[in-house]
Image (tube, rainbow, N blue to C red):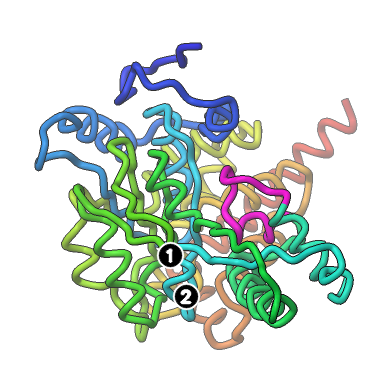
Amino acid sequence: MKEHQSRYHLSPERQLTQEERSLIWKKPRSHKESEQERRISEEIARNWNRGEMKIANILLEGDAGSGKTQLAKALSANFGLPYTKVTCFADMDKSDIIGAILPVLNSERLEELEPNDQAALKALYEGDSFQSAASILADVLKLTSEEAAWKLKQLLKLAVEHADGENVEYRFYPSEIVRAYQHGYLLEIQEPNVIRDAAVLMALNSALELDGSINLPTEVIHRHPDFIVVITTNRSYAGARPLNEALRDRIQHAEKMDLPSKAVMIERAIAKTGYQNEQVLDVLAEIIMTLDIAARANAIKGVAGMRSFFYWTDAVAAGTPVKASLYHKVIYKITTDSEEIKLLEEALNRHGLLESLEQLEKLLKKNEKLMISN
């Protein structure tokens, strides 16, 4: 069956499996196309068949909550490509980039293991190449990416110990990166700047070449022509590790992700929450923008982003007091340090926003009383 094609579809003749179609992100009704989404989609589509000028490695760099992952998913929908992601962590090694070889234990050997380990290995043995080993473990054991990677290494050690002396079958389980690389998916790589091991970064750098390849234990695989990688990383704070220069050099298009304009923030909040009081939303958006600037100016590591804005709006819409919910939905997400909170409050006071919030609170209470009396 031919896929539904948008104006940005890159390989219109490509046939996806049912499982692959299920991985293409479906835009919710609340999704609003941003300028960055339009620009990236047009740039990639324009250069797709231009050989060495092809654009297939994208960098989205900005504060948490600025919409980086949402944008990566939107590109999956625009291009009709399955979306998947990898969240990087400091102690990643080459097996996290490539995959792992595991011995397949017989039922008698499996019974020697703890029930949790038995369940994990059985899930791996019963899985197929559609899921990477780490993602299978994350699903079965409800683990984070880092926990799943650690568990996989533990299982490898256990399986090798219990297979000792046997004529055992070994099976290779590709990583999520290899799966996307080989089958032509859109892969979001989150926070590769946290990786400490230079060898891991070298393997990643090599894979990102347009004509790159990856040496697996079983074969050499080449980059699928439809493979697109979107690197998402938070803008550096004081003391944070900058993105590897060689990795940056392989990027063909980069976007600086900031909070959108106030008008766009309000439009998205209305679409997301259904709350339509623009007078209230204007003040809430102004406070989010002011806190965002104040946090960065004072080297406070937390940020005020769109997610905070949506949850604060939703709380206000449900009748939660505006000022109280400011702390629980926004400020305490940025920091719970008393001195840092004072700095944020001072920034709001300088702009008269705490006073505006109090006036807003009175107005909402007045409107609520009027509605009750009517």
Mark 2 or mark 1: whose residue is earlier in sequence? 2
Disc number at residue 14? none
- Name the element at disc 2: loop
In screen coordinates, is 146 left or right of 98? Answer: right
> Are the residues tagged 2 and 1 within 8 Å (C-beta)?
yes
Quarter of the image for the C terminus: give it. top right
**Relative to 306, is 328 above or below?**
below
- Name the element at disc 1: helix
Disc number at residue 97? 1
Q: Nearer the viewer, mark 2 or mark 1?
A: 1
Crowding around mark 1 (Cα neighbors within 10 Å: few <14, some 14 to 19, many 20+) is many
Q: Position of residue 153 (x, y in %)?
A: 61, 76
Identify the residue at image location x=75%, y=55%. Answer: 123
In this rendered view, identify the residue nearer to me: 147 or 43.
Answer: 147
In this rendered view, identify the residue nearer to me: 254 or 25.
Answer: 25
Hey, what amino acid is under mark 1?
Ile
**Relative to 163, is 210 above or below?**
above
Identify the residue at image location x=60%, y=63%. Answer: 170
Q: Which quadrant of the figure has residue 189?
A: bottom left
Disc number at residue 92? 2
Q: Position of residue 336 (x, y in %)?
A: 63, 80
- Magenta span has 135? yes
- Give the Cα distance between marks 2 and 1: 8 Å
In screen coordinates, is 139 left or right of 232? Answer: right
Q: Position of residue 188 (x, y in %)?
A: 43, 51
Extent of the magenta region: 126-139
In this rendered view, identify the residue nearer to me: 292 or 258.
Answer: 258
